[in-house]
Image (tube, rainbow, N blue to C red):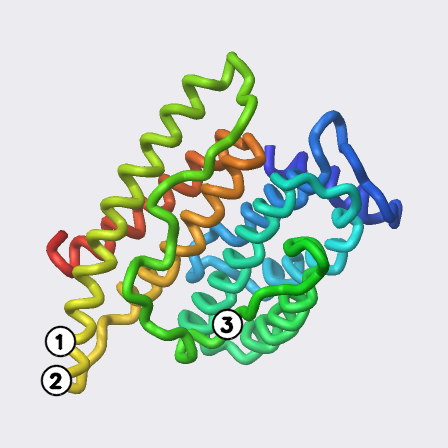
Amino acid sequence: MRITRALLFFACLGAQAQIVPRVGGVAAGSLWRGNLGGILGRNPAEVTSGDLGRFEQYLLGAGAYCAALTPYDYAANRLMVRSMAAYVRTMNQASRDPEIRASLGRISTRISAFPCAFVGGQPEPLIFDPAAVPVPAEPPFALQPPAVDNVAAADKETYSDLQARYRADATRAASAWKSAEIMRASLAAQGATLNANTSVALSRFQLLFGLAAGSMLDRRWDEVLEHLQAAEAETAKVAKVVGR
């Protein structure tokens, strides 16, 4: 299904349309975000320079999806921008490959210029260097899923189940995150750090819950589940180390 959406996306991009309102009955902005989410959700260890090249191409076509945006589009795009920044931070932390890091630098520039996440085109500051991120007092992801209005009757049960799953997953992830921060502080006092795998898993919490929330706003229920399952796997990795 992701492959089909990707082919549709590139067909639109190849047509060089300035306004792409719908593709096969699916909102084009939702399609674009869904394809990006498929790239961002991959395990950092599996990401290749080719994946990053496709990411760059998606960002090049972003301007085609900035016309006639709805409030849901703006909200989903804001989540996507934050997820993209979290993705770059995670990749910068996980990889020392010169080619990948060069691609990440170009991608960071394109993300910073992303034109359709904020009314009036004034973006919020984004951080791409993991070392520059201040340690927040609370987990850097929402503990509650976004509210989606006018859900179709046939989807209401699925939506309700995913809302409940998001809350449960976010609560478990927040507990693991807080325990990890306590462990990080204790290790720092001893001149040590968390192991790399745990740090990368922690860095993916914001990305995956952001992707899940954005997919929920777009009513892409299967992708919400995919991102939550990925968040559950990362939470399990952290919990195994911190004992939660």
Image spot of residue 165 (x, y percent): 32, 33
Q: Does 136 sit left or right of 113 as displayed?
A: left
Q: Does 17 sit left or right of 231 as displayed?
A: right
Q: Does 23 sit left or right of 183 as displayed?
A: right
Q: Is mark 2 on a helix, strand or loop?
A: loop
**Which kind of residue does numbered mark 1 sit on?**
Ser
Image spot of residue 225 (x, y percent): 42, 34
At 42% from the left and 79% from the top, the residue drawn is: 132
**Which kind of residue does numbered mark 2 sit on?**
Gln
Q: Nearer the viewer, mark 2 or mark 3?
A: 3
Residues at discs 2 and 1 in contact (Cβ within 8 Å): yes
Q: Mark 2 points at which residue?
A: 190
Residue 109 falls in image quadrant: bottom right
At 70% from the left and 34% from the top, the residue drawn is: 27
**Which kind of residue does numbered mark 3 sit on?**
Ile
Q: Name the residue under label 3.
A: 127
At 56% from the left and 72% from the top, the residue drawn is: 100
